[in-house]
Structures are given as structure tokens and as C-alpha cells.
Amino acid sequence: MTEPEALDLLVESDRGRELPLPPLLRRLYGPLRMPTHRGRPHVIANFATTLDGVASLTPSGLSGGGEITGFDPHDRMVMGLLRAAADAVIVGAGTLRAVPRHRWTAERVYPKLGPAYRAFRSTRRKDPEPLNVIVSASGELDLGLPVFHSGEVRVLVVTTDLGARRLRRSAPPPWVTVVEAGKGRRLRARSILRAVGRARGGPLVLVEGGPHLLGDFLSEGRLDELFLTVAPQVAGRDARHPRLSLVEGRAFAPEHPRPASLCDVRRGGELLLLRFAFASAA
């Protein structure tokens, strides 16, 4: 993967404290600031969509941002940067099924920038990799997948009481922790964040997917900011292609809209990289 050109900074956020990026990352991205909160983490999400809001080109959701952006190096660089900044990365079971051999680390999405990402984490005295958090109400996960058995990352599985019993019968390795965070078929974003805080308290939590999980965080007012990469293509939908949008499983407007403020705009090649802040975060 070739090194991208530096992003064009069109609108810059002045919210929060500037993080100490290594020179290479600061040249490519520009300044990166993150707000902090007393008693809770700052929760961000990172997604990519087409111009018409499609977040996955397959109806099952088994494709994601890479297919949307064509694996553009600018988008991959920012994805790696946000992972390098985060204490934990949260994904749902559907996202895991979409990329079953993945680990949610900065170097996985942009290996060439691995030394810079590692230096960034070291400067901030972070663990070598963020905690990988897999959310699955059912607990129907293949513990033979690399994220679980490689030992490359610490993993927290957030599930229900029934899911926990199912997973513990499979004897997960010691670096995989299974936590019960509810009952029934749906887990609350609040419970997920509480479980993450107990496993590894830290000031920054990153949500990467999928659209149903993002909807849950928005519905509970638990998302502070959204980093959104917009790709210059129109995907469309029809009866044969009922594709997933950015948010699924929740309806907000017009009765309960979730307004956001545009606070950052950057351009990388043909991509627009936007950053929105939600005032209603709890």
C-alpha cells in the first residue's frame, strides 16, 4: 500500500486537546484533537458511506468501508489513526463475520504506517494495541477465529447470560474475557460501555460497526462524535439489493431526530472526511 498524500484541511475543529501525533502522522492528517469528560470516555464512531448513504454493498452487511471507498489509502490512514488513538475498539458480531480474519489494530489497516502508529501509542503510554470488543447477544461466535486465538490483542466479548454460558463451554483462551451485560436479544450501549470501562478504563472508545450497533449508541445518546468518510459513488437499492444504510434498526426523525454539528472537514483525493459532534451525548 502506497503512502497517501496529506489530507487537505478545509474546516478544523478546535474542540478538545491536541494529541501528540508523530511528525509523519501530523503531516498526513494535520492536528487531531479529542475532548475529554469527567467520569466517562469520549465515544466516537468511524464509518464510510456512498453519496446515498449506503454503508455496505451486500444485504447481509458482509462488506464494509473498504468496499465503499475502494480501500483508498486516505481512508485507511485515518482508520488506523483513530484505532491508534483509541483505548478500545467496539464491533458487532456482524462486522466480525464480514472480516473474520481481522484484528482491530491500526497496523492491520495500514501496515506501512505501523511504526508511526506504535510511536503514537507509546508516547501516550497506551498498551501496544487497543482492546478489541466484540458485541454478540447470542454468543454464537467462532472462537477459532484469529482475533480470539492469535493472542495478538486482548479481547472482551460482551454478551447476554445465555451467550456467556455458550461461550464459556468453548473454553476461551486467557486473553479473551467474556462478560454478561444483559438478558434477552439486545444489549444496551450503556451496558456495553460499562463492561468496557471495567475491563480497561480509558478516555477514548471507538465504535466501528455495524449500522445496527451504531443505531443503538445513537438511540441512547451514547455517541459523542461521528467520523464519516463519504465516497463519490451512488450505490442505489432495489428489490435485489436491499443494502444497509449508515444506521439500521432505529428510526429517529421526524419524531426524535439526532442533530449533529459539522466540526471538521478534510479531503483526501476524491473522498470527503467529515467529523460531526452530537450535543445530546449522555
Image (spheres, grey):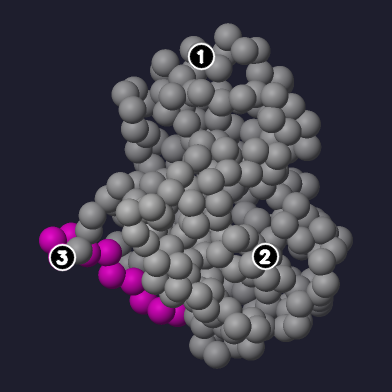
Q: Residues within 10 Å of mark 1 (few under 14, many from 20)?
A: some
Q: SS class of the residue under badge 3? A: loop
Q: Please report the residue visible at 47 percent of the width from the left and 31 percent of the height from the top.
A: 136
Is 199 above or below relative to 271? above
**Residue 33 figure quarter:** bottom right
Q: Please report the residue visible at 64 percent of the width from the left and 81 percent of the height from the top.
A: 268
Instruction: Tell which residue pokes out farthest to the top in this image.
Output: 169
Taking the image as shown, residue 176 lies to the left or right of residue 50, namely: right
The quarter of the image holding the N terminus is: bottom right
Q: Residues within 10 Å of mark 3 (few under 14, many from 20)?
A: few
The quarter of the image holding the C terminus is: bottom left
**Residue 278 figure quarter:** bottom left
Q: Which of label 1 and label 2 is nearer to you?
A: 2
Is 48 above or below relative to 275? above
Where does label 2 land, which residue?
71
Query: Magenta includes 241?
Result: no
By secondary structure, the bulk of the magenta-drawn segment is best described as: loop
Is 90 above or below relative to 261? above
Give amino acid for label 2: Phe
Where does label 1 land, which residue?
166
| Separation of residues labelled 3 and 2 (CA atoms) | 34 Å
| Separation of residues labelled 1 and 2 (CA atoms) | 36 Å
The region drawn magenta spans 254-263
Taking the image as shown, residue 256 lies to the left or right of residue 87, namely: left
